[in-house]
Amino acid sequence: MNSYDEILVALELVGNEDYLIESALKVATDASMIKLVHVCEQIFYPSGPYVGGITMVAPQIDTVALQLRLTELADKYSLAKEGHIVCLGRAASEIHRVAEENAIHLIVIGSHGRHGIQLLLGSTANAVLHGAKCDVLAVRVRGQA
């Protein structure tokens, strides 16, 4: 098995962060660089009196607080202090973009799969797996959050 020098851990920040980071550490070597990423999906809500209104409003996202949370997790696990990313967009697309821009060798992502094809993988984990140009480790997080 090849070593994974660049590992990206995709975090939802819903309570399973430790489990995912610990899973990444299990496959990391002393030379591995582990980066954390959290993607905030922008959801727009109609702001006018009509559901079909054109004006859309997105809730405010405190990216500074999210970045601070990633820094705290990095400190807790003695990871590099820089390179952790908070971004806005569709989770799978942003994870793919960050992985490509950072020459990532392995993406670690949580899987919540519940039924059907999602019994094996959650929809985001499934999309990351099928669109990634690197290896993906889908970690079962049932009961972790």
Image: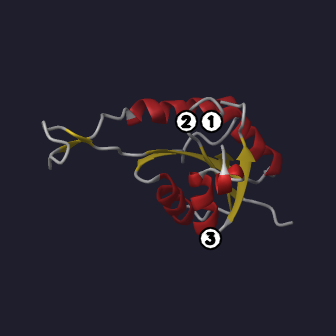
User: Viewed as shown, does residue 92 lie left or right of 122?
Assistant: left
Q: Quadrant of the N terminus?
A: bottom right
| Label 2 sits on residue | 70
Q: CA distance from mark 3 to mark 1?
A: 25 Å
Q: Quadrant of the C terminus?
A: top right
Q: Residue at x 73, y 55 (%)?
A: 137
| Label 3 sits on residue | 133
Q: How many labels sit on residues?
A: 3
Q: Residue at x 47, y 36 (%)?
A: 67
For the question of whether residue 92 can be seen, the reply is yes
Quarter of the figure with residue 42: top left
| Label 1 sits on residue | 74
User: Viewed as shown, does residue 101 lie left or right of 142?
Assistant: left
Q: Earlier in the sequence, mark 3 or mark 1?
A: 1
Label 2 neighbour load within 10 Å: few <14, some 14-19, many 20+: many
Q: Earlier in the sequence, mark 2 or mark 3?
A: 2
User: Viewed as shown, does residue 30 lie left or right of 43?
Assistant: right
Q: CA distance from mark 2 to mark 3?
A: 24 Å
Q: Nearer the viewer, mark 3 or mark 1?
A: 3
Marks 2 and 3 close (CB-CB < 8 Å): no
Type of amino acid under label 2: Leu
- Describe the element under mark 3 as helix, strand or loop: loop
Label 3 neighbour load within 10 Å: few <14, some 14-19, many 20+: some
What percent of the width, then of the height, locates residue 30? Answer: 80, 49
